[in-house]
Image (cartoon, coloured by chain):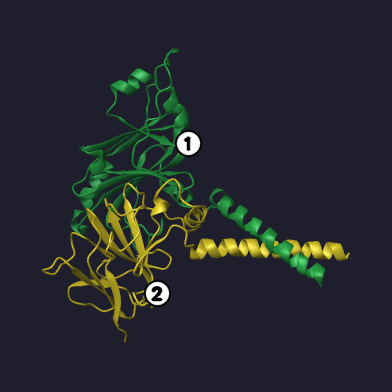
Chain colours: A yellow, B green
Amino acid sequence: MRLIFITLLALLLATVVGLGATWLTATRGTEFGTLTIGAWTARPKTGTADVDPYSRATIVRTGELPVGTGDGVAFSATTDDRKRPLDGRCDIVVSGITPPARFWTLTLYDRKGRLVANSLQRYGFTSQEIIRGADGGFEVRVASRSRAGNWLPTGGIERYALMLRLYDTPVGVATRTARDAPMPSIATVGCP
Amino acid sequence: MIRLLFTIIAGVLLGGVVHLVSILALPRIATQDAYSRLTPLTKLNAVSALPLAAPDNNVIPFMDPAFAIAVCRYDLSTGPIKLAVPVSQSYTSVSFYTRNEVAYYAINDRSAGRKVIELDLMTEAQHAELPEDEDVTAADRLIVDSPSARGLIVLKALAAEPGLMPQAQASLAASSCKVQTEPPPAKQAEAPPPPPARPGRR
């Protein structure tokens, strides 16, 4: 009787620990093969055949299609440079320069990967349509109310993610530091 | 007390095994992966344009709204596939995914270096059956080996400004993805197997 109880307890514990760890890693993601530059994170290996099992689990769970390495690389940010979560009710400025790439796009998603509805149908910017300063740098204002210049509306949602995708770029699996890939800064400049 | 401690240790160790097995099994048992989501929207071995990314359209999460996207869902069991994608004005790329969304190959218009990205997609077995002389005469033909018989080809054309979206969609609409109809000529008995000419960027 006691042996049965103990075996059952061990098996129950194994199920909870095992599936719990799987759920956590598939939802939150892991640190394997991540490239972090400032607030931006990329997983260049997800675009290759030797993607790690944890990333594969995340990809099939969310249903996304990773950007292939011969195509480009995707950086995402959910916090600003000071690790503060991106809040759609605040004014956030994305500014600076981007790594070398033929094209890039900056897109705003909610945490589930959906675009955020707005009357302008402005979901992001491409490198071609952005207004730049005299020095070639740019400044994007991410805010719920309209702003001058490059305004990216948030729709006032509480949490969102920014994605900077570089297309036809040398940035990839071999990139290690911000010197190879200077990413724009993200700063919260004001909250109502 | 000792016995309870052993039980907990055994449970946690076994839990590690359960965790590893479930992580490795997840790609096979997932039902909401991109391939399953695209199956009702796309035709087999043909190019199907996806609706533009919009807030109320979330077939695939985290899709880039600046791109016109079309998908060719392929099944190589009936023969190799010929893919031709005309290059759009700004940027065009073709990405290949296995049934379980492993991005095994991607190419863009510049690395293709022509006005039309032309590719032959086949399984490794079909590639090995290819007669050698044909391989040589068609040296400029790009052959991609698919690790799985089924999968997805995603064609993307950038609309650098929203006004250029119709042009990007039109260039994708002119692309084709179809099973090669003529049966490959029989392999000569003395012909050695061709070298595994895999494309460079992976």
Q: Amino acid at mark 2?
A: Arg
Residue A17's image quarter?
Answer: bottom right
Relative to B152, say whether A147 is above or below: below
Residue A95, which numbered label?
none
Quarter of the picture holding the N terminus of chain B: bottom right
Residue at image mark 2:
A159
Residue at image mark 1:
B149
Instruction: Looking at this view, name the residue that lies furthest to the left.
Output: A134
Badges 2 and 1, same chain: no
Quarter of the picture holding the C terminus of chain B: top left
The spot of residue A58 in percent (x, y) is 49, 58
Q: Amino acid at mark 1?
A: Ala
The spot of residue B156 in percent (x, y) is 30, 48
> Circle 2: is it few (<14), some (14-19), or many (20+) Cα within 10 Å?
some
| Element at label 2 | loop
Disc 2 from disc 1: Cα separation: 40 Å
> Circle 1: is it few (<14), some (14-19), or many (20+) Cα within 10 Å?
some
The spot of residue B116 in percent (x, y) is 23, 37
